[in-house]
Image: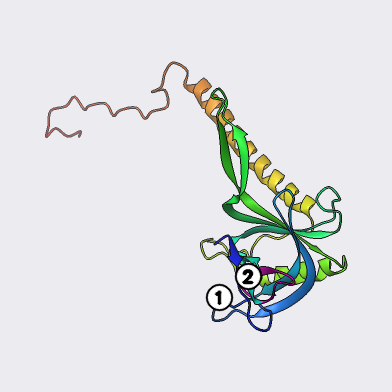
């Protein structure tokens, strides 16, 4: 899964369905796609199907270039109204699959050699009409709920947030909870070490004393 390339369309202009039970639930023309930190792909048509999010560049006919992502590969989707994220209200999407198209250049400490880190794909869908953000988000959430993660043992229907701040707050809360659990474990280990001290056998069960009477003797 992850972000795949769409290279052809049906005569109707819709992307070809990849699943037997897949159907288009919504079509939104004039949606700009921004990949990563600012790789704008121009305006295109956004299709929300029961299985995927599909964006296809406008004005290129049946040979149009586009991108698609299965709902099961979407980790987070949210509404963003932050002007630092986008000049207009948009839909923010993060995939849970590292993608080399989103590589980040970095220097290895002490060696002076450059390396790359494949980041999870981040997408922004920017409608030409800001009022469409609400409708896209609602339909996106409904379709995501149709595709729960089959590898997850619980019954959650995916992760979606009304805004990016909620998403970041949720991640921060999870990190804080993990940190508190680790702290409790460390504190508990320190208390145990203090009680045991230099006598590691202090709390072990005492061995039963051997009965000095010869075998076969009984008490009367």
Please, what secondary structure does the residue beneath circle 1 have?
loop
Please, what secondary structure does the residue beneath circle 2 have?
strand
Q: Residues within 10 Å of mark 2 (few under 14, many from 20)?
A: many
Q: Is residue 70 above or below residue 84?
A: below
- Give whichever of discs 2 and 1 has the lower sequence position: 1
Judging by the rendered image, the residue that carries numbered circle 1 is 18
Q: Are marks 2 and 1 in contact (CB under 8 Å)?
A: yes
Q: Position of residue 92 (x, y in %)?
A: 74, 57
The answer to whether residue 163 is seen in the rendering is: yes
Q: Position of residue 74 (x, y in %)?
A: 63, 60
Residue at image position (73%, 77%) is 26
Q: Is residue 108 above or below residue 146?
A: above
Residue at image position (44%, 15%) is 198
The answer to whether residue 144 is seen in the rendering is: no
Residue at image position (65%, 76%) is 62
Q: Which residues are magenta?
A: 50-61
Q: Is residue 200 above or below residue 51?
A: above
Q: CA distance from mark 2 to mark 1?
A: 9 Å
Colouring method of the image: rainbow
Residue 23 left/right relative to 169: left
Q: Nearer the viewer, residue 122 or 112?
A: 112
Where does the C terminus fall, quadrant-wise?
A: top left
Quarter location, residue 103: top right
Q: Position of residue 73 (x, y in %)?
A: 59, 61
Judging by the rendered image, the residue that carries numbered circle 2 is 52
Quarter location, residue 41: bottom right
| Residue 191 shown in magenta | no
């Amino acid at each position: 899964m992850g972000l795949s390339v769409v290279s052809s369309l049906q005569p109707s202009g819709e992307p070809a369905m990849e699943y037997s039970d897949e159907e288009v639930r919504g079509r939104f023309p004039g949606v700009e796609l921004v990949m990563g930190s600012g790789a704008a792909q121009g305006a295109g048509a956004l299709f929300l199907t029961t299985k995927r999010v599909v964006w296809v560049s406008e004005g290129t006919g049946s040979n149009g270039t586009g991108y698609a992502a299965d709902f099961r590969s979407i980790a987070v989707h949210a509404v963003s109204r932050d002007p630092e994220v986008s000049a207009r209200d948009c839909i923010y999407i993060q995939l849970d699959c590292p993608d080399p198209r989103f590589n980040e250049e970095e220097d290895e400490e002490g060696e002076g050699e450059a390396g790359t880190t494949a980041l999870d794909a981040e997408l922004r869908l920017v409608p030409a009409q800001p009022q469409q953000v609400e409708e896209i988000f609602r339909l996106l959430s409904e379709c995501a709920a149709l595709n729960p993660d089959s590898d997850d043992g619980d019954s959650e229907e995916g992760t979606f947030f009304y805004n990016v701040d909620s998403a970041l707050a949720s991640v921060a809360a999870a990190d804080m909870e993990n940190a508190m659990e680790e702290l409790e474990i460390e504190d508990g280990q320190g208390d145990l070490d203090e009680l045991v001290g230099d006598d590691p056998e202090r709390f072990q069960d005492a061995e039963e004393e051997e009965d000095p009477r010869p075998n076969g003797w009984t008490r009367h």
